[in-house]
Image: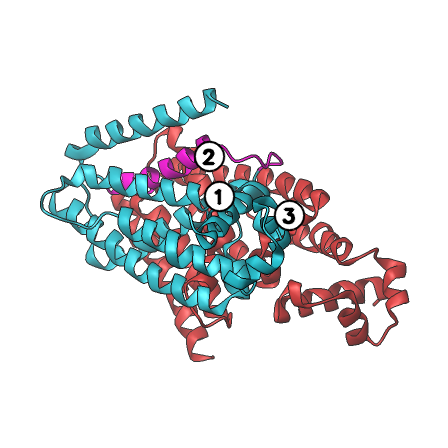
Chain colours: A cyan, B red
Amino acid sequence: MKTRDKIIHASIELFNEQGERNVTTNHIAAHLGISPGNLYYHFRNKEDIILSIYEEYARNLLLDVFPIVSPEVKAFDSIIMYMDAVFQAMMKFRFFYSNLPVLLAKNPMLREKYVEVQVCISERVSQLLLKLRDAKMIKFADEELADIVSILRLVNTFWLSFYQTQTNNVVITDSVFYEGVLKILVIIKPYATEESLPEFFKAREIYREHFHKALEEM
Amino acid sequence: MKTRDKIIHASIELFNEQGERNVTTNHIAAHLGISPGNLYYHFRNKEDIILSIYEEYARNLLLDVFPIVSPEVKAFDSIIMYMDAVFQAMMKFRFFYSNLPVLLAKNPMLREKYVEVQVCISERVSQLLLKLRDAKMIKFADEELADIVSILRLVNTFWLSFYQTQTNNVVITDSVFYEGVLKILVIIKPYATEESLPEFFKAREIYREHFHKALEEM
C-alpha cells in the first residue's frame, strides 16, 4: 500500500476508535511509524485527510452500495439492499456520522461534496419508494414522497448521534447499527399495504436476528 | 437583573447568534462590559455556563411547555401544544440543538441531566400518543409505541442539525423551525384514522401558514 493510502486507512481506524476530535495528525503519524513531515507531504492538515476519506472512500461506498432501481431486482430485495447500504456506511464511517454538523461546518469543501452526494441519495431513495409503490407494497400520495424521503434520511444520518445522546454508555457495537436499520422499517411500515405485511415482517425478522446476534457477541 | 442572570442571558443570545464554538467567556464578559474575573466569580468556565442554562432555563422550559395529558385538554389541542413546545425549545436554545452530541460529550454532568429530562419527555410523548389513540384519532399496536416515540424524538432533536447539513445556507430563520414541526405531523399522519384526517389537515394548515408567513418575513 502507498503511504498516502496507509494514512487514510489508519485515520479511518483511529477516528472510529477514538473519535475524530481526539486524534491529531501527530497521532496518525506515530501510529504508522512515519514522521509528521512525511504525513504533511501528503496532506495539508486533518481536514484535508477527512475530505479525502469522504471523496475517495465514503462517497464511493455510498454510491456503490445504495441500490439503483432496476427491473432485475425485486422490490422487497431492494429494501434489504437499502438497509444494508445504510448499515455499512454508518459502521465504516461512524466517526463521520457521530459528528457530522461540526465536520461540515469546519470544512466548506466537504460540505459541498456532502450536499452533492445527498442529492443523489435522495433521488435513489425516492426511486426505491416509487418502485415499492408500483409493486403495490406501499401506498402514499405523490405529495408525501419528499417528506418520507427526508425523514428516512434524517433518521439514517442522525441515528448514531441520537443513540449517543440517549445513554451514558458510549460504546458503539454492531447492535447499535442494526437497531438504527430497523428504524427504517418502522418508518415505512405504516405505508405498507395489507398484502405486503408478511414480507415486511420477514425483513424485520432478518434484522432482528442480526441485532440479537450482535448483542450476544458483545 | 443580577450579574449571574445577565451572564446567562447574554450567553444564550451570543451562542444562538454566533454558535457556541465561536464564543469564549472573554467574549461574553466583553459583551456585558464586565471583567473576565467577575464572570469567573460566577462560573468556572463555559461548560459551567452551559450546564446552568440547561438546568435553570431549558429544563424548565421543556418541562413547563411539554403538555401533560389531562382530561381537560382535547386530544387535538394536545398535538398543537406538543408542536408548540418543540418549536419553542428548538428556537430558544438553537445553539444547544445545533451541536448536541459534542456538548454532551464534553460535559458528563450535562449529559446526565439531559438523559433525565429525555426520559421524562418520552413518557409524556407516550401518554400523548395513547390519549390520541383513546380518542380514536390514531391507531397503532402497543408494541409499536416505543418506536414511534423514539422516531418523533429523534426527528425533533436533530431536525436543526439535519437542516444545517443539507444546505450551504447556514442562516436559521423561524421558517426552519416550522418546517421541523411540520415533520411531526408527517410522522403521525399514516397512523391517523379516517375520521380524524380532517383535524390533521387543519393542524397542518395552521403550521403551513406559520411557515409561509415566516418565509415572507425573511
Question: Which of the two labelled residues, at mark 2 and mark 1, occupies the earlier sequence position?
Answer: 1
| Chain of the residue under the numbered disc 3 shown in the image | B
Predominant SS along the magenta part:
helix
- How far separated are the C-alphas under marks 1 and 3? 14 Å
The secondary structure type at the circle numbered 1 is: helix
Label 2 amino acid? Val
Residue, disc 3: B104
Q: Residues within 10 Å of mark 1 (few under 14, many from 20)?
A: many
Say if A183 sits above or below B156 in the image.
Answer: above
Q: Residues within 10 Å of mark 2 (few under 14, many from 20)?
A: some
Task: Identify the magenta region.
Answer: A167-191
| Chain of the residue under the numbered disc 2 shown in the image | A
User: Taking B143 as reference, is A65 left or right?
Assistant: left
User: Taking A21 as reference, is B73 left or right?
Assistant: left
Residue, disc 1: A160
Say if A40 sits above or below A212 in the image.
Answer: below
Residue for point 46% across, 55% down: A4
Say if A181 sits above or below B197 in the image.
Answer: above
Residue, disc 2: A176
Which residue occupies the foreground of this view, A112 or A50? A50
Residue A79 in picture, x, y percent from top left = 24, 40
Verify CB contact (< 8 Å) between mark 1 and mark 3: no
User: Taking B197 as reference, is A11 left or right?
Assistant: right
| Quadrant of the image containing the N terminus of chain B | bottom right
Verify CB contact (< 8 Å) between mark 2 and mark 1: yes
Residue A22 appears in the picture as rendered: yes
Label 3 amino acid? Leu
Which residue occupies the foreground of this view, B167 or B112? B167
Residue A191 in picture, x, y percent from top left = 24, 43
Residue A146 in picture, x, y percent from top left = 28, 58
Which residue occupies the foreground of this view, A30 or B21? A30
- How far separated are the C-alphas under marks 2 and 1? 8 Å
